[in-house]
């Protein structure tokens, strides 16, 4: 899709550490990290193994090219947490429509990147630039989209445009939004849940396991008596501690959760294998079947390697057992693996840094968390080269889909739950003589109905005449999305944000917060931007 030389990665990072009891053996030397990449080349998956170095907390990080890297920042402090791994997927460039007028990607409803940033800033640090995924920042927020009409299918497509606040003269911003239909709680299917819980020794730190237990208690209390819950755990080894039990017997489930204690090292693969085996045994075709992995980072995936566990996860997803990954804690944390496990398991990835975030994921957004209304959702935007001269997609760097594969229904893409919204932002430049009424861009959305298996396609266009005359005349949620995206662009040190400052973003965030006084996420965002702006040079 994009004429640039770079890898499309579905990446696993296997970390080989020297363990002393439950902890890492401290050493000032650089540690060797074996990295397994699953690289897509001309439609084929090619497994490559390379070796890079990752600095321990006691030694400074080496300069490195984009790729798996340890977390840390030079401002205001360096290396706040040891052994935190992210992937640098690069930054999308501007594309001339004469070279490529199609932009194609898989949707993403993850929010982990945003809440990881929140953890860093609240702890007094700027997040590593490679931890920032712009789309996850934008998708964290309410967008104010109307749900689809009954005859529209799973989604309503919303398009809005205005002059870009940050893109420079003659550049415009377009917000492409999808809004899924709602499923009232009383109408949702029963669920068969399998919790796979990391109880390794590191989960004792910062009360991580206690936060997991509180989160799972909240979830169980929201379930119906006819739902079922099973629990597998893993430390040095994995084992089942509760076979699937109806929530009508909630006391048994809660007692099993209360008994969780940290133990040993980390064998995530064995825990996942046991969890999926339990889920397959309890599988109910009339219910929603989902595995929920709760971990502080998954330091390894066992002995057979990433290809094996990823293939198992993909196979189970095709059979109707989805995976949600939820991260807890920081330090010895592998963001790359948590995200890619969820992507391969046709689920989503969240990072829980507070009890309030646990409540958002497991209580307020419960139906969206558990159910799926559309599978393999892909978006393709067709720009008219006579109207739009160039464009740039903000974010979604690791969600690229080849243009030719938009209608290839064998290609895996993203899943969406009821009530979920998805937003993508494009910066575009019009031709000086662009026709006002001709469609500037047409958005196509393709997805599979999870119940019928029917593949459906929607489309909607926007013309230059549909754009707001000024940025301030666009909807306030459009303005919020633009400011959130610019914040993310600055944090990841994007070339396209080199003229912006966090202080300018804070000023705009303050103005927008005045229009949205009842949205606590916006108030919190303002506070985070103001904190971060004090640390920027």
Image (cartoon, helix red, strand yellow):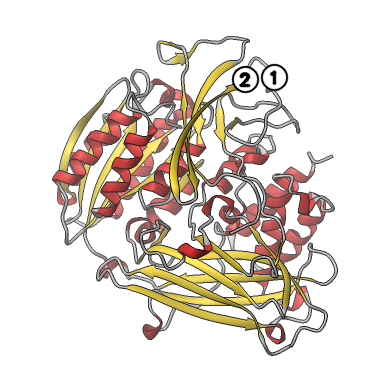
Q: Nearer the viewer, residue 45 or 439?
A: 45
Say whether disc 2 or disc 1 marks the residue closer to the N-terminus.
2
Classify residue 408 as left or right of residue 73.
left
| Residue 31 figure quarter | top right
SS at mark 2 in the image: loop
Q: Position of residue 444 (x, y in %)?
A: 50, 74
For the N terminus, the quadrant is bottom right
Relative image position of residue 143 (x, y in whole percent):
57, 68
- The image quadrant where one finds the C terminus is top right
Rendering quarter of residue 286:
bottom left
> Marks 2 and 1: CB-CB under 8 Å?
yes
Relative depth, front residue between 67 and 530: 67
> Seen from this angle, which residue lies furthest bottom?
437
- Residue 391 falls left or right of residue 363: right
Disc 2 from disc 1: Cα separation? 6 Å
Determine which residue is flagged by label 2: 55
Q: Secondary structure at mark 1?
A: loop
Q: Residue at x 44, y 23 (%)?
A: 202
Q: Is residue 286 above or below residue 313?
A: below
Residue 387, given in percent of the width and then of the height, sits at 72, 80
Q: Which residue is mark 1?
A: 60
Residue 121 percent location from the top left of the image: 66, 40
Residue 121 in view in this figure: no
Residue at the front extreme of this rendering: 42
Q: Quadrant of residue 377?
A: bottom left
The answer to which of 238 and 438 lies nearer the viewer is: 438
Say if 529 sits above or below 253 in the image.
below
- Which residue: 28% across, 22% down? 237
């Amino acid at each position: 899709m994009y004429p640039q030389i770079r890898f499309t990665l579905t990446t696993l990072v296997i970390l080989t550490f020297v363990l002393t009891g439950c902890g890492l053996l401290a050493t000032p030397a650089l540690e060797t990290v074996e990295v397994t990449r699953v690289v897509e080349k001309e439609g084929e998956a090619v497994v490559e193994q390379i070796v890079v170095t990752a600095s321990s907390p006691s030694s400074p990080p080496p300069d490195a090219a984009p790729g798996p890297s340890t977390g840390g920042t030079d401002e205001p402090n360096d290396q706040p947490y040891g052994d935190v791994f992210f992937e640098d997927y690069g930054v999308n460039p501007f594309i001339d429509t004469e070279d490529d007028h199609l932009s194609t990607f898989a949707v993403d409803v993850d929010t982990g990147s945003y809440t990881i940033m929140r953890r860093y800033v609240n702890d007094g640090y700027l997040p590593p630039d490679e931890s920032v995924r712009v789309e996850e920042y934008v998708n964290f927020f309410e967008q104010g989209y109307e749900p689809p009409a009954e005859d529209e299918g799973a989604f309503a497509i919303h398009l809005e445009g205005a002059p870009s606040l940050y893109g420079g003269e003659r550049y415009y911003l377009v917000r492409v939004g999808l809004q899924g239909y709602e499923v009232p709680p009383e109408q949702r299917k029963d669920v068969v849940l399998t919790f796979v819980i990391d109880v390794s020794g590191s989960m004792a730190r910062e009360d991580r396991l206690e936060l997991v237990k509180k989160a799972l208690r909240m979830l169980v209390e929201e379930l119906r008596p006819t739902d079922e819950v099973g629990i597998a755990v893993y430390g040095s080894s994995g084992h089942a501690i509760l076979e699937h039990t109806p929530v009508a017997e909630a006391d048994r489930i809660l007692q099993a959760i209360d008994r969780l204690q940290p133990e040993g090292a980390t064998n995530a693969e064995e825990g996942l294998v046991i969890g999926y085996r339990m889920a397959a045994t309890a599988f109910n075709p009339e219910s929603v079947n989902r595995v929920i992995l709760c971990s502080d980072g998954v330091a390894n995936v066992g002995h057979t390697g990433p290809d094996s566990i990823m293939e198992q996860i993909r196979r189970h997803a095709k059979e109707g057992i989805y995976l949600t990954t939820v991260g807890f804690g920081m330090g010895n944390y592998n963001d790359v693996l948590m995200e890619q496990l969820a992507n391969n398991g046709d689920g989503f990835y969240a990072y829980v840094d507070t009890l309030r975030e646990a409540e958002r994921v497991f209580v307020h957004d419960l139906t969206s968390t558990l159910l799926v209304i559309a599978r393999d959702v892909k978006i393709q935007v067709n720009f008219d080269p006579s109207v739009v001269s160039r464009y740039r997609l903000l974010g979604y760097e690791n969600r690229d889909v080849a243009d030719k594969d938009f209608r290839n229904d064998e290609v895996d893409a993203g899943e969406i739950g009821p009530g979920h919204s998805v937003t993508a932002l494009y910066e575009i430049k019009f031709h000086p003589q662009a026709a006002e009424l001709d469609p500037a861009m047409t958005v196509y959305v393709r997805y599979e109905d999870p119940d019928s298996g029917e593949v459906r396609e929607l489309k909607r266009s926007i013309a230059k005449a549909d754009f707001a005359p000024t940025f301030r005349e666009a909807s306030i949620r459009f303005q919020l999305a633009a400011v959130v995206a610019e914040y993310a662009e600055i944090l990841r040190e994007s070339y396209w944000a080199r003229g912006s400052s966090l202080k300018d973003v804070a000023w705009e965030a303050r103005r927008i917060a005045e229009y949205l006084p009842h949205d606590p996420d916006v108030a919190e965002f303002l506070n985070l931007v103001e904190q971060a702006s004090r640390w920027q040079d």
